[in-house]
Amino acid sequence: MKQLLMFSNSEDGRHICTEKSVAHCRGDVVIAGIFPFYSWELVRNMNDPALQQQSDQINIKKYQLLFNLVLAVEEINKNAHLLPNMTMGFEIYSAHYKDTDLLEDALIWLSGKNRNSPNYTCRRDSKALAVLTGTSSTSVPIGTLLDLYKLPQFTYGSFDPILSDHGKFGTVYQMAAKDSALALAIVSLMLHFSWTWVGLFITEEDYGVWFLSELREEMDKNGVCLAFENMITYNAFSDFTNDLWMHRQLLESSTNVIIIYGDSKFLLCFMLKLRDFLITGKVWIMNSPYDDVTIGKRYFLIDSFHAPLIFSHHHRNTAGFTNFILTETLSKNSGDNSLPRSWIQSVYCLLIKSDCRDLGHCSYNATLDWLLRHIFDMTMSDESYNIYNAVYAVAHALHQMILYLMEEPPVHNAQPRAFLSSQLHHFLKKIKFTNPVGDQVVLNEERKSEAEYDIMSFWNFPEGLGQRVKVGKFSPSRSHDQQLILFENLIEWPIGITKTPQSVCTESCGPGFRKTSLEGNATCCFDCTPCSENEISKGIDMEQCVRCPDYQLANTERNTCLLKTENFLAYEDPLGKTLACTALCCSALTAAVLGVFIKHQDTPIVKANNRALSYILLISLTCCFLCSLLFLGRPHTATCILQHTTFAVVFTMAVSTVLAKTITVVLAFTLTAPGRSMRQWLVSRAPKLIIPICTLIQVTLCGFWLGISPPFVDRDVHSEHGHVIILCNMGSITAFYCVLGYLGSIALASFIVSFLARNLPDTFNEAKFLTFSMLVFFSVWLTFLPVYHSTKGKVMVAVEVFSILASSGGLLGCIFAPKCYIILIRPERNSLSRFRARSQSGRNKH
């Protein structure tokens, strides 16, 4: 530790090298950076267009990486609370794109003195702590090499799952956030615009395969489908024969949204592949590694003509970055502390491709402002921000290690580089700090929070230069409905698109229809099938139709359920009015007959067949007529209970009265020995006991019925289309048929007895009328049963009411009409002398 603290502060001189390294700054500890200052592109051979060759081009935008490294180093060196009494320096090398030269810069840095000498170093005391590398194409081979030296390697490119294998890359730290939420972010954008039919071009590298699995999972969960899916290798880009096929696929596909996922090299290859083709009317969505690309007409895919939507990692912009470029690093007045003016002039001259042999041809003062505004972004890119955090991570880890070593005895006879490099990993894996812009930095992948994404678009500016504009944001940590925020008024759609585009395989199924999948096609391709009868669908693209409740009916459009019309035999209906008037008239007529009988109660015809039974029968028939009114109107619980119980009791009383009258006639003519007390008792007492006994038995049966399962209000929703029939459910069907069976048995007994007594003397004998009345009674109810079970709704109730009125009217007419005729029309026949004369003439005949 003492040896580390004894490092002398070297002169703060910066030097732009003309040899292997691009720039370096001396310090007590040094961070190396291998930056891709050159991009490459495929250039077609003019003699043979099918052949393409690689050409290296300077990428001015990549010099921002150097500026961010310088900014972070200077901030740390000025911070009295971070690495006090120490200075940090850097060494910058230009990365090569050729696979054969990938390890050259790393070996030169390890060997020192700008020499490539494997397993040998020209440095006596190395101050190197870590190295910064870019994409996985360079990080993987360099990481394998540096793992031998236990040197920490920080990757500032996109997250690569391969480098997460700590068994192979135990010394590699990925500064980029893991794109675990990128698939969800892209699918959320699809859902926001209702894009369910998209195309995909993706790299065949391992991280592309990983992202594809994540994207498929999110798409399957949210009903988004891939119209086509092309995994492209870098070797395929050099094959010109595939260009027309890719172009035709893009034009002929019905999708209007294309997703591109890959690193900057993949994106550059893809754009160069299709640069000679005009493709309009497509929305392009891609991830953010486009910094290798200088915006211009050659790279059509990222200009305002195609206006892609780009997902980049969200981070706070460093407030000092712009000031650093304007006032310190590139300021005219910063003197010797700035990067040499000749370097700035050479960069500008390279850009405009002037003759730079004489640097005096390039005016520094006239070109600096244009260079800053249009060549160097005033905001940090993702890669620049990762470099910024990596430098701070090394500084914090080294600071913690120094504090730890101050409490431990120094280790003697140890090599500083091996000691620092190997011991630094322990602190890097646990490091957690807040950078100067307020973002939390964690190197442990398991402890990292999910990345947030800014959604960027391009606006066109004069001279064909594009400006990135933030049009939205995606935050996976928020609630589901607040994760995606979009400012649609800021989105510039591609040329040829005037409104928000649509991208679906099949037009949405509207209300009243459901989706029907097509065998062999994606789930987003379907037919729209109308909902079945009494089923509806209210939404768009419904998987299933919903059946209306039983009391509702689907409308003709099959998009809403309407309440069915309630149907019952109301008093207001013509049929209800007719039946009600008939019941009232018949009951009034029965009451009138009762009045006639009471008025002529002392006449022989009234007294002949037990006038008390006649009164009971007339009162019972009046109740029978009136009980039919319980079947009219809207059913309620009380009316349902009273309907059939009242009907059963009053009809039992009426039929049992008929039975009593019949038995009275039989007893009167069959019992001999006049004057005997037994005859008088049987004629006067026995028939009267039949009525209360029979009625009491029926009341008991009705009581059991109500106790077990009484009638209740019910709704029949199936019998009539579009109607709900309000009716009374019998409750216990067994009890109901017991009540009816008992009533039928009394009626059958009355019919049998009256039929046997039909030939008795009939001067005032009503045996024949009783027989005929019971015949009418049976005829009505035997006809009622099949008709009742074959009808539904209020017609069924009307049949039952009509049967009650008809059977009651049959009893009234057959029994009392002849007597009323004699009393009112032929009163001379209603006398005892006439009765005796007719009886005498009958005996004379015999």
Image (tube, rainbow, N blue to C red):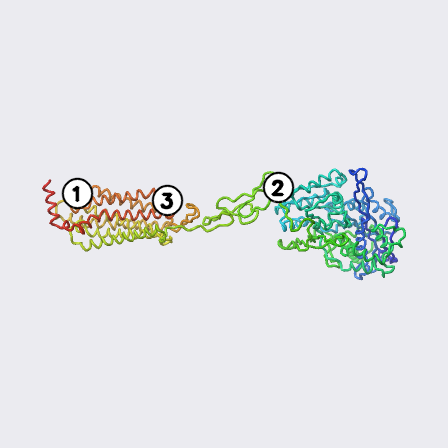
On the image, the x and y values in percent for residue 635 come to 37, 52
Q: In what element is the residue under mark 3?
A: loop
Side of 346 relative to 829 (left or right): right
Badge 1 vs badge 2, beta-carbon distance below 8 Å: no
Q: Which residue is mark 3?
A: 791
Alpha-carbon span between mark 1 and mark 3: 43 Å
Residue toward you, 150 or 335: 335
Q: Is residue 625 above or below residue 276?
A: below
Mark 2 burial class by Cα count in 10 Å: few <14, some 14-19, many 20+? some
Tell which circle, 2 or 3, labels the residue nearer the N-terminal end. Answer: 2
Tell which circle, 1 or 3, labels the residue nearer the N-terminal end. Answer: 1
Q: Nearer the viewer, mark 1 or mark 2?
A: 2
Say what amino acid the circle numbered 3 marks. Answer: Thr
Residue 522, label in figure? 2
Residue 204 figure quarter: top right
On the image, the x and y values in percent for residue 650 come to 28, 51
Q: Residue at x 62, y 53 (%)?
A: 480
Residue 263, label in figure? none
Residue toward you, 496 or 780: 496
- Does the rendering let one see residue 454? yes
Instruction: For the C terminus, give its image quadrant.
Output: top left
Tell which circle, 1 or 2, labels the residue nearer the N-terminal end. Answer: 2
Check the image and name the residue furthest to the left.
Answer: 844
Q: In what element is the residue under mark 2?
A: loop
Side of 838 relative to 145 (left or right): left
Alpha-carbon span between mark 1 and mark 2: 93 Å
Say what amino acid the circle numbered 2 marks. Answer: Ala
Mark 1 burial class by Cα count in 10 Å: few <14, some 14-19, many 20+? some
Residue 760, label in figure? 1
Alpha-carbon span between mark 2 and mark 3: 51 Å
